[in-house]
Image (spheres, helix red, strand yellow):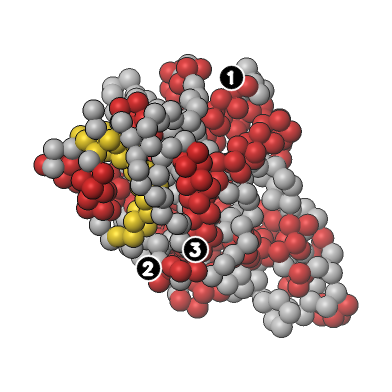
Amino acid sequence: MGNAIHWFRRDLRISDNSALQLAARRGDGVVGVFVIDDRWFPAHTGKMGAFQAQFWLESLRALSAELERHHVPLRIVRSSDPVKAVVDLAHKVGATLITFNKDYDPDQLAMDRRLERTAKTNGIEAVALKDAVIFEEFEVLTGTNSTYTVFSPYKRAWLAKFQPAHAAVSGPPRVSRRYPMVSDPVPAGESLGYPKVTLPVPIGEAGGAAMLEEFAKHRIGFYKKDRDYPALNGVSKLSSHLSAGTVSIRQCVRAAIAQGALRGCGGAEHWLSELIWREFYKMVIFHFPHTVRSAFQQRYDHLQWSSAENLVTAWKQARTGYPIVDAAMRQLQTTGLMHNRLRMIAAMFLTKDLDTDWRIGERHFMQALMDYDQASNVGGWQWSAGTGTDAAPYFRIMNPILQGQRYDPDGVFVKSMLPELSNVPAKFVHEPWMMPSELQREYRCIIGSDYPAPIVDHNEAREAAIKKFQM
Ligand SMILES: Cc1cc2nc3c(=O)[nH]c(=O)nc-3n(C[C@H](O)[C@H](O)[C@H](O)COP(=O)(O)OP(=O)(O)OC[C@H]3O[C@@H](n4cnc5c(N)ncnc54)[C@H](O)[C@@H]3O)c2cc1C
């Protein structure tokens, strides 16, 4: 045998980690490596944002401590060529095996193919395992062996194929002999140019496990009923953990099943369905890599977007004058997260009301979200823009006033994010410009000075968007 390298990417945990287990089984000693990819991390690249960078770096620090307890040193390498960094390390420690868990995003897939080729020419075996999903690219296909492009039949086929054994969970790896190497310190976000932020959820494997346990024990039963109301604590907030791999998909699916997801228990069943959405988008991005840059439905590639800079800036800065949109964008700015219902509202507002190219919004979310995941983000944006798989039909455009009134009827969420509206009564909270001037004075919310007037007229923008899609 020889030593093994495990390349950590979106799997920052020691438990239930498929490829790490393999490295421990096959290697004499195991060395972990995490590459701080210069093309992603330093703040100035404009790719990974402050919330996600801090979540990852803090989780990495916790991972390093756990790995130490399991006799695995962790190297942290800064490089713009991860493949070279990993293969160089393999040479250094005399590794005959490199393991990593599979990713389905096109750029990462290309890098993984390169790693496999480079390792081979260097006489090193590279093995990639399924870990991030229950079923991967060719496991859930239609009767004619093609890819599902609509969610509901995909979900039916997924559920028909699923056996509880697919969600079997393994423990931490057993490494018999520690490779004599000192773990590297994990850099602070500040050293990579990031401002320090306050994270809204606990980090690392322990944080993810505690959140999953709390959600499954106390709240999953209410998920179906509460999930659309941003003022309620109705969702799991586990997306940053699923994206960094500090919790495994099998742990989540197992928890959902234990709460009755396969026995028709509404909340758990619905939550499992959301986990399947995540998997659906991973399969879509694998089979249709063009969707990262262009419309899934290619007939919409010709659409011209005006993408006016002043409107896009107002949207990013939570100054559109539509409270539910601004509260959503304020939540993103201040927490690195945004409730799912609000993501749909904010994304639809940018693409339809502000006639802005969905890629501009997708990129902004990439830089701002703590749970950024390319497949789900591209999927969510194309859905909202009406250009994606299963997309919202182009004529079904969310009305930000009605959405606010329906999902935040008393304005509790909006007020929690926009204190400038805190005195405005519920009747006006989603359309404060309708207040006569004496009420604006009484509630200390003068439109145009304390809070902006709407930057576009929703009804006019809606008609223009429908016309554009019909052309
Ligand atoms: C425009 C837009 C952009 C999005 N960008 C991302 C992103 O970058 N990263 C990301 O993880 N999710 C993204 N989503 C999906 C969804 O909004 C988040 O996964 C969800 O809000 C996370 O909150 P939660 O963990 O409390 O989810 P819960 O409601 O508790 O759901 C559990 C898990 O299921 C998965 N999930 C839930 N809804 C979806 C969905 N619609 N699509 C795919 N997976 C889902 C997530 O992994 C989530 O953590 C986006 C949605 C839209 C409309």
Which of disc 1 and disc 2 is earlier in sequence?
A: 2
Q: Residue furthest left?
A: 121
Give the foreground label among 2 and 3.
Answer: 3
Viewed as shown, does residue 244 lie left or right of 27? right
Amino acid type indicated by mark 1: Leu
Cα distance, mark 2 to mark 3?
17 Å
For the residues marked 3 and 1, what is the alpha-carbon distance in whole angstroms?
Answer: 43 Å
Residue nearest the viewer, comparing 102 with 385: 102
Residue hosting label 2: 45
Q: Can the viewer see residue 394?
A: no
Q: Position of residue 145 (x, y in %)?
A: 28, 24
Residue 17 in sight from this viewpoint: yes
Q: Secondary structure at mark 2?
A: helix
- The extreme front residue here reads 180
The image's mark for residue 29 is none
Q: Which residue is mark 3?
A: 188
Q: Is residue 276 left or right of residue 387?
A: right
Which residue corresponds to the image point at 71% horizontal and 30% vertical from the top-left? 217
Place residue 303 in its image quadrant: bottom left
Question: Looking at the rendering, in which quadrant would you find the C terminus?
Answer: bottom left
Residue that numbered label 1 is attached to: 262
Which percent across, then down, holds residue 309?
46, 76
At a point 46% along the width and 69% down the height, the residue shown is 191
Count of numbered tags: 3
Q: Quadrant of residue 333?
A: bottom right
The amino acid pointed to by label 2 is Thr
Residue 407 x, y percent position in the rendering: 71, 50
Q: First in sequence, mark 3 or 1: give its number.
A: 3
SS for dot 1: loop
Q: Using a 10 Å C-alpha cutoff, classify the residue at mark 1 as few (fewer than 14 neighbours), some (14 to 19) or many (20 or more).
A: some
The disc, 2 or 3, on the residue closer to the chain's N-terminal end is: 2
Name the amino acid type tagged 3: Ala
